Amino acid sequence: MEIICDWKDCKKRGIHKAPVEKNNSKKFRWLCLEHVKEFNKDWDYFKGMSQEQIAEFLKADLTWHKPTQSFSAPDNFFNILWGSVLENKEKAFLGNAEIKNENKKMQFSNQDIKAFEIMDLEIGTKWEEIYTKFKTLVKKFHPDMNSGNKKFEEKLKIITLAYTQLKMTYKTK
Ligand SMILES: [Zn+2]
């Protein structure tokens, strides 16, 4: 049985899950690619996250790091991550994370699609290219490169969350 996109007057196949309400992730409807993008356009799904939630989210990406490191302030997560990328600690940065065999067809969630958009990448880009893009963006928007400009820092934080989202998807569990 084929699911049809839930968007008004759309007859395409609904292959992407989208929450019925933007802040309610419990109920879903199915949309085609075009309409899930439309749905996502104005939705900054990180916006509602508290500093603690963001810290928890990023923690998932820091398993490579020395367990002795203290992450007292949420901002430390960002600084450590960015510092590591800028110092070219590529190997350490990827750490123990095994990346999925990308030749197999991967399933992407609504959040993944949003993350690809935030990073300005094609959906399903290879992990290596995602990492390279992230590195470029860190260099471009790092506060040290922009006289501590807060606007760029906020932008880089959102990019970092998107990157972390993708990393969790590409990691084998
Ligand atoms: Zn549609």
Image (cartoon, rainbow, N blue to C red):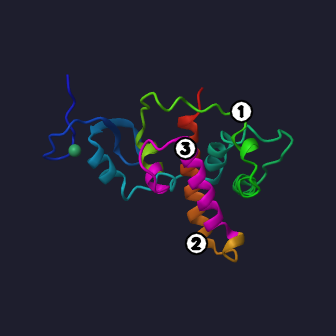
Between disc 1 and disc 2, whose residue precedes? 1
Quarter of the image containing the C terminus?
top right
Count how many numbered circles sit on residues in the image.
3
Q: In this view of the protein, which residue sits in the foreground, 151 or 84?
A: 84
The Cα–Cα distance between marks 2 and 3, rounded to whole angstroms, is 22 Å
Between disc 2 and disc 3, whose residue precedes? 2
**Residue position for label 2:** 151
Q: Which mark is residue 96?
A: 1
Q: Which residues are magenta?
A: 116-143
Image height of 62 relative to 74, above or below? above
* Residue sitting at x 72%, y 37%: 95
Residue 52 percent coordinates (x, y): 65, 49
* Residue sitting at x 55%, y 41%: 127
* Residue sitting at x 83%, y 40%: 66
The amino acid beneath tag 1 is Asn
Q: Check the image and name the residue furthest to the top.
A: 1
The amino acid beneath tag 3 is Gln
Instruction: Say whether residue 103 is left or right of residue 95.
Output: left
